[in-house]
Image (cartoon, grey):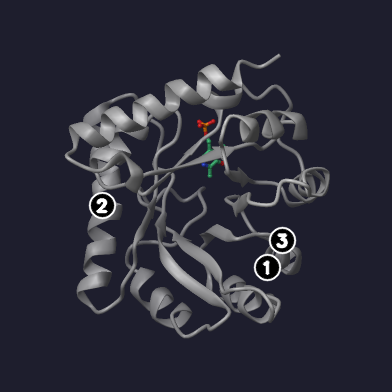
Amino acid sequence: MHKIDDQLVKVTARIHQAATAAGRNPQTVQLIAVSKTQPAQALRDAYTWGQRAFGENYLQEALEKQAQLADLADVSWHFIGPIQSNKTRPIAEHFDWVHSVDRLKIAQRLHEQRPAGQPPLNICVQVNIDDETTKSGISLAELPALVAAIAHLTGLRLRGLMAIPAATNDAAQQRAAFAKLRFALEQLNQQGYALDCLSMGMSGDLEAAIAEGATHVRVGTDIFGARTKPASN
Ligand SMILES: *Cc1c(COP(=O)(O)O)cnc(C)c1O
């Protein structure tokens, strides 16, 4: 069995310590358990230990697990993977948050396809903070125009920004990348938006992210262990 309870306690303690060191209330940092490639039972175990927010990258896999876990009523589901435009409808219908919106076409489709009876879909715009050509995310230069266009879409509630910086073990470099995202959010808010979310920080860099203001950290490996199954669908 996974030692999910121990792992959750450790990650929660890291969050607490990082927030306290930064002079922040630890309750302002939400832990999203990234459960891609993990079986439904692993999420159920985490739920038993109090975890309520889960992040998934692959739509088909996520929908299967949601069906298996339908009895867990108060879970929030976060879509954090790349989005193909022909897959937006089930995302709009079955998730509470989408962290990986990086173009207007996707935002428009999610807005149109969000069922009327549900609250607006919480979204973050994914920013390619290092301008890596291979990665998803909009550039900082194009961010203000995209945010302005998305802000009109009533099916969505624009909450903030998300980034996955280039992996590095250097704490100063980690912080520099996260600071760029924080600064981008501050600039948008100075222009009149009221964005309250910075989705940044994973197993290897959550301390640096919290030091720079992360409100949502997305942690997989350090909760569920190494992912054995290769990414698919
Ligand atoms: C897989 C993934 C994570 C979690 O990464 P870990 O290093 O396993 O904690 C976080 N965010 C996104 C977008 C991911 O795809």
| Residue at image location 43% in from the left, 75% down from the top | 146
Whichever of labels 3 and 2 marks the residue nearer the N terminus, that label is 3
Identified by mark 3, the residue type is: His
> Does the CB distance between marks 1 and 3 fall below 8 Å?
yes
| Residue at image location 34% in from the left, 44% down from the top | 27
Q: Which one is closest to the eye, mark 3 or mark 2?
A: 3
Q: Which one is closest to the eye, mark 1 or mark 2?
A: 1
Is residue 81 in view?
A: yes
Q: Position of residue 170 (x, y in %)?
A: 28, 26
Is residue 174 in view?
A: no
Identified by mark 1, the residue type is: Ala
Q: Position of residue 129 (x, y in %)?
A: 36, 51
Question: How many residues crowd around disc 1 within 10 Å: few (fewer than 14), some, or many (20 or more)?
Answer: many
Q: Nearer the viewer, residue 41 or 63?
A: 41
| Residue at image location 46% in from the left, 23% down from the top | 9
Q: Quadrant of the C terminus?
A: top right
Whichever of labels 1 and 2 marks the residue nearer the N terminus, that label is 1
CA distance separating discs 3 and 2: 31 Å
Check disc 1 and report the residue beneath it.
Answer: 92
Check disc 3 and report the residue beneath it.
Answer: 94
In the image, is the residue at mark 3 within 8 Å of ligand 1 by its beta carbon? Answer: no
Among the 4 quarters of the image, the one containing residue 228: top right
**How many marks overall?**
3
Check disc 2 and report the residue beneath it.
Answer: 180
Q: Position of residue 156 (x, y in %)?
A: 54, 75
CA distance separating discs 1 and 2: 29 Å
